[in-house]
């Protein structure tokens, strides 16, 4: 394999782009969990697992955002009392 071929693969490969993306942690942990103990799963099951994971992540983000809002509001109240 020539250097040009390797460079083209690294530049154009969807797999390489995924590994370099910010979502790589999410993707790899999802795939490891989804395929744990099995070599193949049905597409419908994979889709359902991904939907569940995304819902869980969204709920976590909403909870984190709500907590941050409470902290900021509490800080604002404390600052205004001074």
Image (cartoon, helix red, strand yellow):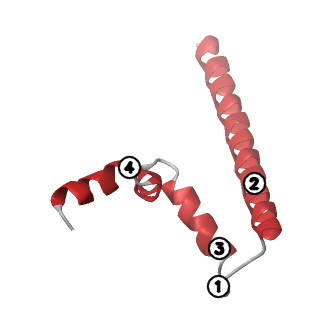
The residue identified by callout 2 is: 56
Q: Residue at x 21, y 68 (%)?
A: 1
4 or 1: mark nearer the eye: 4
Q: Are marks 4 and 2 in contact (CB under 8 Å)?
A: no
Q: Residues within 10 Å of mark 3 (few under 14, many from 20)?
A: few
Mark 2 falls on what kind of element?
Answer: helix
4 or 2: mark nearer the eye: 4
N-terminal of the pair, mark 2 or mark 1, is: 1
Q: How far apart are the alpha carbons under marks 3 and 1? A: 12 Å
Foreground of the two, 1 or 66: 1
Q: How far apart are the alpha carbons under marks 4 and 3? A: 28 Å
Foreground of the two, 62 or 14: 14
Relative to 64, residue 42 above or below:
below
The residue identified by callout 1 is: 39
Q: Residues within 10 Å of mark 4 (few under 14, many from 20)?
A: few
Relative to 26, residue 58 above or below:
above
Mark 4 falls on what kind of element?
Answer: helix
Could you tell me residue 76's position as x and y percent? 63, 18
Name which quarter of the figure residue 64 lies in: top right
Q: How far apart are the alpha carbons under marks 4 and 1? A: 27 Å
Mark 3 falls on what kind of element?
Answer: helix
The residue identified by callout 3 is: 33
Q: Residues within 10 Å of mark 2 (few under 14, many from 20)?
A: few
């Amino acid at each position: 394999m020539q250097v040009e071929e390797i460079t083209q693969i690294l530049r154009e490969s969807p797999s390489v782009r995924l590994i370099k993306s910010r979502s790589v942690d999410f993707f790899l942990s999802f795939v490891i969990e989804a395929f744990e103990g099995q070599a193949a799963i049905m597409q419908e099951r994979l889709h359902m697992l991904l939907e569940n994971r995304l819902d869980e992540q969204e709920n976590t983000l909403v909870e984190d955002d709500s907590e941050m809002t409470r902290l900021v509001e509490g800080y604002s109240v404390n600052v205004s009392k001074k």
